[in-house]
Structure formats: structure tokens, C-alpha cells
Image (cartoon, grey):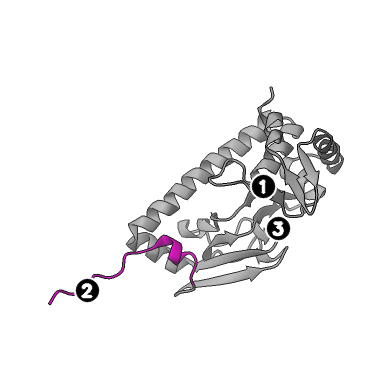
């Protein structure tokens, strides 16, 4: 009598269900997942929502490292031996987050090639995004940087239909994200609204026409 084969590994199931070394966190807006200097002992995965990664200088100045959307991993530096967090992670709105203990993450990466490929693909895509962010910061105007951030928050360019409505985000936050002042952000937002690129109606609606700002020389 032949023995039954074990069920094939499903990465989606692994990332959406509670299991050994995994917990699912239902978070409200501004929920702190970890602080700079906390023990680095887990990897996180965003099922839904947005998470902001920030660093704080010794002088008390905060800078945004990244804003990550659904399907993103973060906190993976613990897998390389990093003992403490170099940044803080906070939800920008309501979010659902999977916390995967370091050892559980190492085991699944070792034992499941399909998951390892998924994780590696994500790291490569995020590395590309970091390079694009650096080029954007170095060479583009504040107006272009703001337009790009709004389009990214609305998930233009991702597979499927974009999400034209952005969760409430302050102009101060947008200014931190693109490295300019709140007054400049306010000026550009009024300009975008006047040109019909964005509108306020039960949230911030971003129209595809905003791409004209990013693509314009």
C-alpha cells in the first residue's frame, strides 16, 4: 500500500494563517509594531494596509525610510544576524500584519523552495524600488516627488486595478516622505486639485492624469 504524499506547500496559505511561530495582528492607525533599538527577532508581512518605516537621529530628527503596502515583507534584517532594529515600524491606517518568528522564517526558507523564491523575488523588487527612490530624491523636483508618492500610495503600476482612494494622510507626513516643507506640499496639492489630477471626496482620489507630472521633463 503506497503512503500518502504530504500536501504541497502553499505560500499564500502560509502567509494568511496562524501557525507555529506565526501570529496575525489586527492593527489600528498609528500602531507601533516595533521601535528603533528593539530586539530584531521576527519578520513581518503585510496582509492589508500600509506600514511606515522611520529612523530617528540622535538630534531627534525623524526620516521616513519607506512606506510599504500589502504583500510587502519587512524586518528581514534579523535573518542576517542584526540584533536590534535600526528603524521603527508604524501602521499608517488600519492594517493586518503577520508576525513570523525568526526561527520559523529560517525554517520555511530552508525547507520550502517555493517560498524561498517568493521571498527572494520580493527582495529584488524592493531593492529596485529603493534605487528608484534614491534617483527620485537626487534628481527630481519636489513636485515630481510628491506626484510619484501619491501614485505609489494609490498603487498605480501594480497588477490589477489601482486603488484611487488613499487613506487619510497629513500634508506633514507627505512632506517628510519627499523631503520638503508642508507649505510646499500644500501648494502642489492645490495645484494638482485645480488641474484635476486629484480630488477630495470621501478621501483623496488620485487620477491617472497625475502621471503627466511624473513623465513631464
Q: Which residue is mark 1?
A: 153
Q: Nearer the viewer, residue 114 or 176?
A: 114
* Left or right of 110 in this view: 182: right
| Main secondary structure along the magenta-highlighted residues | loop
Please tell me whether residue 40 is drawn above or below residue 21 in the rendered image: above
Residue drawn 69% across and 29% down? 212
Q: Which residue is mark 3?
A: 92
C-alpha separation, residue under disc 1 versus residue under disc 3: 11 Å
Q: Earlier in the sequence, mark 2 or mark 1?
A: 2
C-alpha separation, residue under disc 2 versus residue under disc 1: 46 Å
* Left or right of 202 in this view: 79: left
Q: Evaluate if marks 2 and 3 touch, with contact meaning CB atoms under 8 Å apart.
A: no
Residue drawn 43% across and 50% down? 120
C-alpha separation, residue under disc 2 versus residue under disc 3: 46 Å
* Left or right of 84 in this view: 105: left
Q: Which residues are magenta?
A: 1-17
Q: Earlier in the sequence, mark 2 or mark 3?
A: 2
- Label 3: element kind: loop
**Quadrant of image for the C terminus:** top right
- Residue that protrudes farthest toward the bottom in the picture: 1
**Is any atom of residue 34 visible in this view?**
no
- Residue that protrudes farthest toward the top in the picture: 217
Q: Which residue is mark 2?
A: 4
Please tell me whether residue 187 is drawn above or below residue 166 in the rendered image: above
Amino acid at each position: 500500500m503506497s503512503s500518502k504524499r504530504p500536501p504541497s506547500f502553499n505560500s499564500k496559505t502560509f502567509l494568511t494563517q496562524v501557525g507555529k511561530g506565526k501570529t496575525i495582528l489586527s492593527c489600528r492607525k498609528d500602531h507601533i509594531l516595533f521601535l528603533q533599538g528593539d530586539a530584531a527577532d521576527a519578520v513581518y508581512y503585510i496582509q492589508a494596509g500600509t506600514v511606515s518605516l522611520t529612523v530617528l537621529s540622535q538630534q531627534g530628527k525623524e526620516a521616513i525610510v519607506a512606506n510599504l503596502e500589502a504583500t510587502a515583507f519587512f524586518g528581514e534584517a534579523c535573518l542576517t544576524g542584526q540584533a536590534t532594529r535600526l528603524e521603527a515600524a508604524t501602521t499608517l491606517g488600519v492594517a493586518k500584519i503577520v508576525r513570523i518568528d525568526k526561527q520559523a522564517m529560517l525554517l520555511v526558507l530552508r525547507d520550502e523552495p517555493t517560498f524561498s523564491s517568493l521571498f527572494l523575488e520580493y527582495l529584488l523588487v524592493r531593492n529596485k524600488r529603493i534605487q528608484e527612490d534614491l534617483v527620485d530624491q537626487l534628481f527630481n523636483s519636489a513636485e515630481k516627488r510628491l506626484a510619484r508618492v501619491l501614485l505609489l500610495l494609490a498603487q498605480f503600476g501594480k497588477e490589477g486595478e489601482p486603488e484611487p482612494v488613499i487613506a487619510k494622510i497629513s500634508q506633514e507626513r507627505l512632506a517628510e516622505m519627499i523631503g520638503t516643507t508642508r507649505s510646499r506640499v500644500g501648494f502642489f496639492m492645490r495645484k494638482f486639485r485645480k488641474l484635476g489630477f486629484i480630488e477630495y471626496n470621501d478621501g483623496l482620489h488620485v487620477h491617472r492624469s497625475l502621471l503627466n507630472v511624473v513623465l513631464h521633463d
